[in-house]
Image (tube, rainbow, N blue to C red):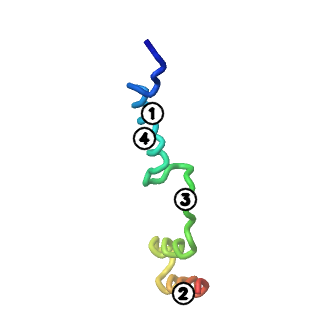
Amino acid sequence: MYDGYHFLGMHLFWWFGWGIFIFWIFALPYEIPGQRRKKDTALDILEKRFIDGKIHADEYREKRRVLLQDKV
């Protein structure tokens, strides 16, 4: 009955399903808990603080100017 044909029939569909599942895990466009992500730069942190209202526009401009001078 069995005849050793592993890759014919339903077994092939299981491998196809596992392949899709593995691809889905590693190619997700959204963040997975525990996944490594790019660290924020100082400029990103400064912009977030300005948007949140933790610093004023004058302080933002001065610190941004200093940060951009260091890059050059």
Residue 15 numbered tag? 1
Front label number (1 vs 4) = 1
Question: Which of the 4 image quadrants contains residue 19?
Answer: top left
Front label number (2 vs 1) = 1
Q: Which residue is mark 3?
A: 37
Question: Which of 44 and 3 lies nearest the eye of the viewer?
Answer: 3
Q: Give the alpha-carbon distance from disc 3 to disc 2, as whole Å.
A: 27 Å
Q: Decide which of tag 4 and tag 2 comes sooner along the chain.
A: 4
Residue 7 numbered tag? none
Front label number (4 vs 2) = 4
CA neighbours of label 3 inside 10 A, class few (<14), some (14 to 19), many (20+): few
Residues under numbered marks 3 and 2 in contact, where contact means CB atoms less than 8 Å apart:
no
Query: What residue type is disc 4 on?
Result: Ile
Question: Which of 4 and 9 lies nearest the eye of the viewer?
Answer: 4
- From what the image shows, is residue 16 above or below residue 36? above
Q: Which residue is mark 2?
A: 65
Front label number (3 vs 4) = 4
Q: Decide which of tag 3 and tag 4 comes sooner along the chain.
A: 4
Query: What residue type is disc 2 on?
Result: Arg
Question: Which of 40 and 49 lies nearest the eye of the viewer?
Answer: 40
Q: Give the alpha-carbon distance from disc 2 to disc 1, as whole Å.
A: 55 Å
Question: Which of the 4 image quadrants contains residue 10?
Answer: top left
CA neighbours of label 2 inside 10 A, class few (<14), some (14 to 19), many (20+): few
Q: Give the alpha-carbon distance from disc 3 to disc 4, as whole Å.
A: 23 Å
Q: Give the alpha-carbon distance from disc 1 to disc 4, as whole Å.
A: 9 Å
